[in-house]
Image (tube, rainbow, N blue to C red):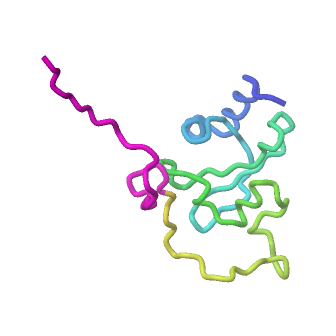
Amino acid sequence: MSTSLYRQIKNIWASGFQRYAKQMATMGDAKAGTLVGVDDYGNEFYETEDPDEIHLRTRWVEYKDSKTWDISQIEPGWHYWLGYGTNIPPNKVSGEEKTVRGYESPKIHSPNLTGTSGAYVPYNTAKPKFQSWEPFVSNRAS
């Protein structure tokens, strides 16, 4: 299956124009589906059973904060479900199937700062392999 004008119009009609505008600004595609769950950060996870949808593009996330978004803002269980590692979403897992973290998750999620002024830059102690050229002008012999 591929993207088509019919598929786009059908998804706009099903999800509404306001949601379509948000999806185009964040994902670059119009999608309509059912809400599967919400994680602790407020992100919403959707899935569709539409046969016109692109293969392995039937699950997606709509981030709570649409200004800054990246995959580090998703909990590991939901990330595994989005990548088709399992067909059971984390909010439907119960009993012995439920995993327990070996450490407590942080209360405040620190965002990924790559590409910003707050990004980690290691201190370089290696000697440079070349030096910049410094022009030297000598007087001509007359």
First to last magenta residue range:
113-142
Check if residue 115 falls in the magenta segment: yes
Quadrant in which residue 53 is drawn: top right
Q: Quadrant of the C terminus?
A: top left
Rendering quarter of residue 101: bottom right
Relative to 97, 142 lies left or right: left
Count of numbered badges drawn on the protein: 0
Give the image location of residue 126, x and y in percent. Answer: 46, 58
x and y percentages locating residue 140 in the rendered image: 17, 21
Which of the two residues, 15 or 124, is positioned nearer the viewer here?
A: 124
Residue 141 position within the rendered picture, expressed as x and y whole percent measured from the top left: 16, 20
Picture residue at 85% right of the left edge, 82% below the top: 96
- Whether the magenta-drawn stretch holds residue 37 is answered as no
Would you place residue 10 above or below residue 125 in this image? above
Identify the image quadrant of residue 45.
bottom right
* Placement of 18 over or under 79, stated as above or below: above
Residue placed at 52% from the left, 76% from the top? 107
As drawn, is 115 to the left or to the right of 87? left
Front position in the image: 101 or 59: 101
Is residue 70 left or right of 95 when viewed as pictured?
Answer: left
- In the rendered image, residue 73, in percent from the top left (x then y), is placed at 58, 60
Name the quarter where the N terminus is drawn.
Answer: top right
